[in-house]
């Protein structure tokens, strides 16, 4: 009797373990999956702006490389009852916004394309980028996108939150320059959301955060951009009240 109860408990434990998203993704797909303390797991957890977010312990970290892989994860999640999180650059300071304790974390790190099309003047950007990576990819192309003022900020949370930019006085919120979202919906359908085909969803995604699905790429309006000149004004802490500007030595 005791033995069969133990066997039943063990069987139940196997069923429960088999039902976790991490176990199912591991068993049914070839999606990159990391658990504590694998190096990819600990290094991904170290890439948060807030160490408090990085201290949380997801049950596993999933790193899909394609939209189809994200959809496969979502269809497993949808048949499940687990809390999960989606991470782009990990710059959000709040625990659980892009970080998770005990459930699966989906890192968009490998969805990191930056593809400029000068003919249509658009650039397709994956949520796995931070803005410094987008800037580096566009550097020298003659085009720019309305993006973050700090290079360390991730594309995903920034664009889904609206996005203030140095270019906002000219073009508005960064979200105003999004032409299309490639989105994995909660039922794992993949759609390309535009103003004309899903006007309500298109509007909701401009500030709606991660509530309406997982965006796997953004099609942004690109803007022609020449050289940008920058520098610092340094003022001496003296009693002298005359205004002086230090200029860099001319070259
Ligand atoms: C899902 O999980 C939550 C939190 O653990 C629990 O309250 C809820 O009853 C669960 N729902 C189902 C359908 O199992
Ligand atoms: C998923 O949801 C969308 C929006 O409600 C719907 O248009 C689509 O048909 C659904 N897909 C499936 C496979 O049920």
Image: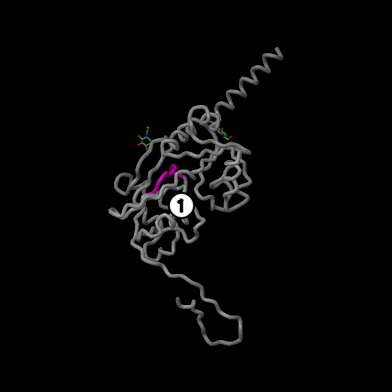
Residue drawn at (56%, 26%), measured in percent from left and top?
18
User: Could you say which is closer to the camera, residue 196 or residue 22?
Assistant: 22
Please tell me whether residue 213 belongs to the stretch shown in magenta.
Answer: yes
Q: In the image, residue 172 lies at what x, y percent?
A: 39, 61
Residue, far top: 1
Image: 229 above or below 164:
below
Total numbered circles: 1
State the quadrant of the C terminus. Answer: bottom left
Image: 146 above or below 82:
below
Please tell me whether residue 151 belongs to the stretch shown in magenta.
Answer: no
Q: In the image, residue 37 lies at what x, y percent?
A: 63, 38
Residue, far left: 119
The CB of the residue at mark 1 lies under 8 Å from ligand 2? no
42 with respect to 179 (left or right):
right
Q: Secondary structure at mark 1?
A: helix
The residue tagged 1 is: 155
Quarter of the view holding residue 34: top right
Residue drawn at (60%, 52%), measured in percent from left and top?
50
Residue, far right: 2
User: Could you say which is closer to the camera, residue 16 or residue 148?
Assistant: 148
Q: In the image, residue 143 lies at what x, y percent?
A: 35, 59
**Badge 1 density bin: few <14, some 14–19, many ≥20, Cα 10 Å:** many
Q: In the image, residue 89 lies at what x, y percent?
A: 51, 50
**Magenta span covers which residues?**
211-218
Q: Quadrant of ligand 1?
A: top right
Residue drawn at (28%, 54%), measured in percent from left and top?
119
Residue drawn at (35%, 45%), measured in percent from left and top?
193
């Amino acid at each position: 009797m005791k033995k069969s109860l133990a066997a039943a408990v063990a069987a139940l434990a196997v069923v429960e373990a088999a039902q976790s998203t991490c176990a199912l993704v591991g068993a049914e797909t070839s999606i990159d999956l990391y658990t504590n303390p694998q190096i990819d797991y600990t290094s991904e957890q170290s890439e948060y702006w807030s160490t408090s977010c990085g201290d949380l312990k997801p049950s596993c970290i999933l790193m899909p490389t394609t939209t189809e892989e994200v959809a496969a994860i979502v269809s497993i999640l949808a048949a499940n009852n687990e809390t999960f999180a989606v991470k782009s650059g990990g710059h959000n300071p709040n625990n659980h916004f892009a970080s998770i304790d005990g459930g699966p974390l989906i890192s968009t790190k490998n969805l990191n394309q930056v593809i400029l099309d000068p003919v249509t003047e658009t650039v397709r950007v994956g949520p796995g980028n931070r803005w410094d990576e987008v800037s580096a990819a566009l550097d020298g192309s003659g085009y720019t996108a309305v993006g973050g003022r700090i290079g360390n900020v991730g594309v995903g949370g920034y664009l889904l939150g609206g996005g203030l930019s140095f270019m906002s006085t000219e073009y508005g919120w960064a979200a105003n320059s999004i032409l299309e979202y490639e989105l994995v919906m909660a039922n794992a359908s993949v759609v390309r959301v535009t103003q004309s085909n899903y006007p309500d969803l298109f509007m909701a995604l401009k500030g709606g955060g991660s509530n309406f699905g997982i965006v796997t790429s953004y099609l942004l309006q690109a803007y022609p951009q020449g050289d940008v000149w920058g520098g610092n004004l340094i003022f001496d802490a003296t009693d002298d009240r005359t205004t002086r500007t230090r200029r860099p030595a001319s070259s």
